[in-house]
Amino acid sequence: MLDSPCVEHLFIITGTTRGIGRALADRVLALDRSFVVGFSRADAFFEGNRQDVRIDLNAIETIGSAFDAIGLDSERTGGLKQTVLINNAGVLAPIAPIVDCDPEELAGNIRVNLTAPMVLAHHFYRFSKSFPGKKWIVNITSGASRSPYFGWSAYGAAKAGLDMATRAMALEFSRIDPAFRVCAVAPGTVDTDMQAQIRKCTPEQFERVDKFIDLKANNALFTPEQTARDLIRLILEGGLENGRRYDLREMTGQLPAETPAIATGKNAARYRGA
């Protein structure tokens, strides 16, 4: 159990069994007075300042009951400064031209990458609206939301939809409850199981596979731990704005902006060189 029952930072993170999601959970656990809820396919448990709730995000009808299973009472949430939902879980498959894709896999991709984050946002509002402090929904997006990739029709379409859903939800919350804010963050190329999946593709499935093989060979991938460190810091320090879409590597000065900067002015300068 926590030394104090009071929690100041509550993070609900999807996809915490590996990769970025696991690193995000570990990063939050290192904070004082924090509590992490992981939504994943891992076995459920509750110990100290962490709870895992078992859920399959393909089954969107179970998302509401997953929030109901969170075991924090009013004594522990009365001092909250921030409650954050990070929609991190995602699937890449099917990787193939649309004519070769399995229809059920296509539908499943959209469910996990787009429908589930929107349903999670719906239930997150119900779950946290009575809590004190700020509430954030951070949607993990991708460069594929802006550039079409041969073989990634479902993934790119879902992430593009998530970008628009982010903008629309931010507009809605600004009128319904300004305590809630929504943004999207593209983490860049991170060394995860998804990257390993990409490198196993044939050029017929994904014609840019050589680029991703080279990134790994040249040690040019960011680590999940580095990504988690940068994203959690930006959230806690107030470096994000409602309705914005960010490239995390531009925000932290690790890549030059190839397109007009998403984060400009004081925010870009604040995190340059991190």
Image (cartoon, rainbow, N blue to C red):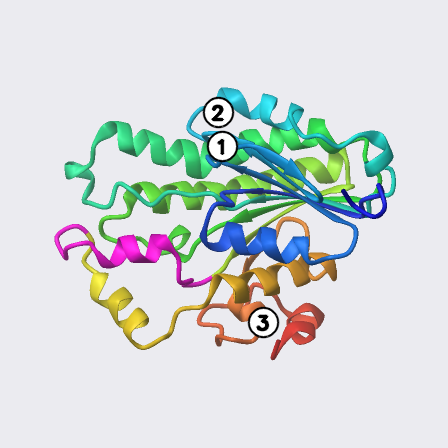
- Across and down, in percent, residue 4 comes to 85, 46
Determine the residue positioned at 49% across, 54% down.
Answer: 20
Q: Amino acid at mark 1?
A: Ala
Question: In the rendered structure, which disc, 3 or 1, sits on the residue that comes first in sequence?
Answer: 1
Disc number for residue 60:
2
Quadrant of the image for the N terminus?
A: top right
Whole-Å distance between the Cαs marked 3 and 1?
A: 29 Å
Q: Nearer the viewer, residue 142 or 190?
A: 190
Whole-Å distance between the Cαs marked 2 and 3?
A: 34 Å
Determine the residue positioned at 46% across, 68% down.
Answer: 259
Q: Nearer the viewer, residue 139 or 227?
A: 227
The residue that mark 3 highlights is: 252
Q: Is residue 174 above or below residue 116?
A: below
Residue 155: which quarter of the image? top left
Question: In the rendered structure, which disc, 1 or 2, sits on the residue that comes first in sequence?
Answer: 2
* Crowdedness near tag 1: few (<14), some (14–19) or many (≥20) residues, C-alpha within 10 Å: many
The residue that mark 1 highlights is: 116
Quadrant of the image for the C terminus?
A: bottom right
Question: In the rendered structure, which disc, 2 or 3, sits on the residue that comes first in sequence?
Answer: 2
Q: Which residues are magenta?
A: 188-205
Residues tagged 1 and 2 counted as in contact (Cβ below 8 A): yes
